[in-house]
Amino acid sequence: MTDDRGTDFMNEQIHSGGSDEPEHGALGDAEYAEFMELAAEEGFDLEEVEGAIGEAGHGPLPVLAVVGRPNVGKSTLVNRIIGRREAVVEDKPGVTRDRVTYEAEWAGRRFKLVDTGGWEQDVLGIDASVAAQAEYAIEAADAVVFVVDSTVGVTDTDEAVVRLLRKAKKPVVLCANKVDGQSGEADATALWSLGIGEPFPVSSLHGRGTGDMLDAVLEALPEAPQQTFGAAGIGGPRRIALIGRPNVGKSSLLNKVAKEDRVVVNEMAGTTRDPVDELIELGGVTWKFVDTAGIRKRVHLQQGADYYASLRTAAAVEKAEVAVILIDSSESISIQDQRIVTMAVEAGRAIVVAYNKWDTLDEERRYYLEREIETELGQVAWAPRVNVSARTGRHMEKLVPAIETAIEGWETRVPTGRLNAFLGELVAAHPHPVRGGKQPRILFGTQAGTKPPRFVLFASGFIEAGYRRYVERRLREEFGFEGTPIHISVRVREKRGRKK
């Protein structure tokens, strides 16, 4: 830290009354005022500081999904919006297979842009393929850009997507793509027949009309994204998603905690197709457990019902507060197990890892499993762990305490004064390595949000990824955060703005 104020900053905290979120991220009014004064002294642009706190305090950026049938120009439009050629574009349908997310900005507002694809015919027909991809993208988004090829006009597939959009009741901006000149305006006008509002004539290839369309997008997107798990904050039951590979025992575990057969269990993998919600009372508390379909492999390698089930599972995780990841301890930890863990971490959920079928292990397998956990799942070493048997009920009583621990970490908030005292000690004891003759320093920081904890650090120069991981590790050692991912963003001071 640069001076005594940096180390002792706000030793006396001012807490806002009640349970409402403070107005400025995690900061009360008086704390916010002094924080901004410190930022000014350190030479930061105050609008940028306020924006950084606001973004982190409001959680993830708003999400805009780009949907439409194959080969209507979705990826070309995405490239146009993000201002660089990043999404793969080829003149044939089905090039984009997985959902791909980018960060975009228009008129000073940032949002996430989700490019969708993979709508290929399979054994269940085109309608099921469209539903599988579009339903998840729409459900996870705050608003939708629906892209239609104006030179072709409305197709049966377009009308199928419109039905999904109406059902989802999300704001929709209709993009009439491939309008390269005045002659195409009439084609765009014909798309009023879809009944979802004004079609914006656009040429994503040449950029024509994209500005007007993006202005409409900003009107459709919320200033701050909705919290999909917000029901729990107003008294609803906590949502716990049970996720894992097929046949790891998710349905058996749900039946065991419920003490009755709530869902079908079968030795054949893949019995569960859609998420199943069950209200279960444990320890005097009602929980909403969601039994999900097993995620088999990469989404774009799946077909038919399996493909659809994986997308539904991903949506269930987005809506949950806690992800209980089941791993079959009798088998080696697989790449797919690691992908499922990554999905839960990236979704920002609290996490508990449950190693099922523990009763089947001999001493040798337990030894090798511990080594696998260290090497393959080191990224979630902070998550509570329970060794259970859904078949016999072994250690099932430990599951709820582990969930409660993860939720506590997920909701933990560190007062700004305490955080900055910690950062001052950290920087003094272990400064950032010198790079190019300069030594960047973390000057001060704040926790701008929870669920999961989000920190904004303000620095004199670029902070390397390795040092950020060190800061995260020390934050966990000092303040706990058991069972939750931590998001850390860094804002670097502009040289010209520093005051002497």
Image (tube, helix red, strand yellow):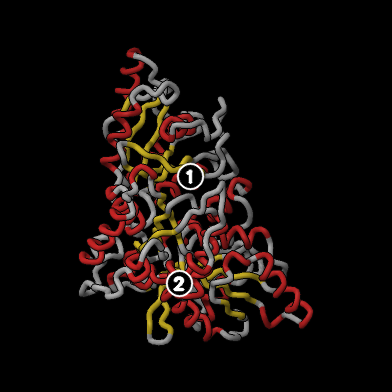
Q: Position of residue 2 (x, y in %)?
A: 39, 61
Q: Residue 158 falls in which quadrant of the image?
A: top left
Q: Which residue lies furthest to the right in this view?
A: 364
Question: SS for tag 2?
Answer: strand
Label 1 is placed on what type of residue? Thr
Report whether residue 249 is seen: yes
Decide if residue 169 is on the left or right side of residue 242.
Answer: left
Tags 1 and 2 in contact by the CB under 8 Å rule?
A: no
Name the mark on residue 101. 1
Q: How many labels does the image show?
A: 2
Q: Which of 83 and 154 is in front in this view?
A: 83
Q: Which of 382 and 32 is in front in this view?
A: 32
Q: Nearer the viewer, residue 81 or 146?
A: 81
Label 2 is placed on what type of residue? Phe
Q: Position of residue 78 (x, y in %)?
A: 45, 34
Q: Where is residue 131 in the image (x, y as percent from the top left)?
A: 46, 45
Question: SS for tag 1?
Answer: strand
Counting residues from the start of the chain, the first of labels 1 and 2 encountered is: 1
Report whether residue 232 is seen: no
Q: Residue furthest top?
A: 183
Mark 1 surroundings within 10 Å by alpha-carbon count, few (fewer than 14), some (14 through 19), many (20 or more): some
Name the mark on residue 485. none
Q: Where is residue 417 in the image (x, y as percent from the top left)?
A: 33, 70
Front tag of 1 and 2? 1
Question: Residue at left 43%, top 52%?
Answer: 460
Question: Residue at left 41%, top 43%?
Answer: 65
Question: Residue at left 50%, top 57%?
Answer: 346
Residue topped by disc 2? 289
Question: Residue at left 30%, top 36%?
Answer: 107
Mark 2 surroundings within 10 Å by alpha-carbon count, few (fewer than 14), some (14 through 19), many (20 or more): many
